[in-house]
Image (spheres, rainbow, N blue to C red):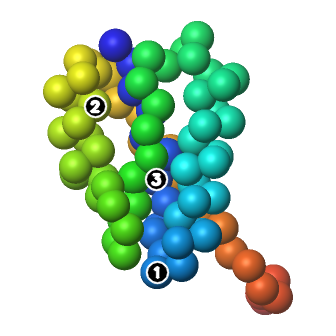
């Protein structure tokens, strides 16, 4: 079974974390042919963390796991 984990930084703002949940739902709607399991995880400040998520998808039967990092930056762009 193939698993995809969408990895975000995590935030103290509940709304920011919910954006990743919504993104994961959208990806599930369009990628179910490629992945049997699609979940999300955070590096810090929110749950599940990446190690918990990896454990969960393995328990669910995943034999191949792809981790896709998604990091958003809001604010002024910085160009050098």
| Residue holding disc 1 | 12
Say whether residue 60 is left or right of residue 4.
Answer: left
Of badges 1 and 2, the one in the foreground is 1
Total numbered badges shown on the rendered structure:
3
Q: Secondary structure at mark 2?
A: helix
Mark 2 vs 3: CB contact within 8 A = no
Q: Position of residue 50 (x, y in %)?
A: 30, 53
State the mark number for residue 28: none
Q: Quadrant of residue 74?
A: bottom right
| Residue holding disc 3 | 7
Q: Residue at x 46, y 81 (%)?
A: 12
State the mark number for residue 57: 2
Question: Crowdedness of circle 1 by 10 Å Cα count: few (<14), some, many (20+)?
Answer: few
Task: Look at the picture and state if 15 lies above or below 4.
Answer: below
Task: Look at the picture and state if 35 lies above or below 41.
Answer: above
**How many angstroms separate mark 2 from mark 3 (CA)?**
14 Å
Q: Quadrant of residue 25?
A: top right
Q: Residue at x 17, y 27 (%)?
A: 59
Mark 1 vs 2: CB contact within 8 A = no
Question: Crowdedness of circle 3 by 10 Å Cα count: few (<14), some, many (20+)?
Answer: many
**How many angstroms separate mark 1 from mark 3 (CA)?**
16 Å
Task: Look at the picture and state if 69 lies above or below 67.
Answer: below
Quadrant location, the C terminus: bottom right
Which mark sits nearer the N-terminus, 1 or 2?
A: 1
Q: Position of residue 5 (x, y in %)?
A: 43, 40
Which mark sits nearer the N-terminus, 1 or 3?
A: 3
Q: Residue at x 24, y 23 (%)?
A: 60
Task: Look at the picture and state if 9 lies above or below 7.
Answer: below
């Amino acid at each position: 079974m193939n698993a995809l984990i969408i990895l975000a930084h995590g935030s103290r703002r509940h709304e920011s974390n919910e954006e990743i949940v919504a993104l994961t739902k959208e990806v599930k709607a369009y990628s179910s042919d490629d992945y049997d399991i699609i979940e999300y995880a955070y590096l810090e400040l929110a749950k599940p963390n990446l190690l918990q998520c990896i454990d969960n998808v393995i328990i669910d039967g995943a034999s191949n796991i792809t981790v896709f990092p998604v990091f958003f930056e809001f604010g002024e762009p910085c160009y050098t």
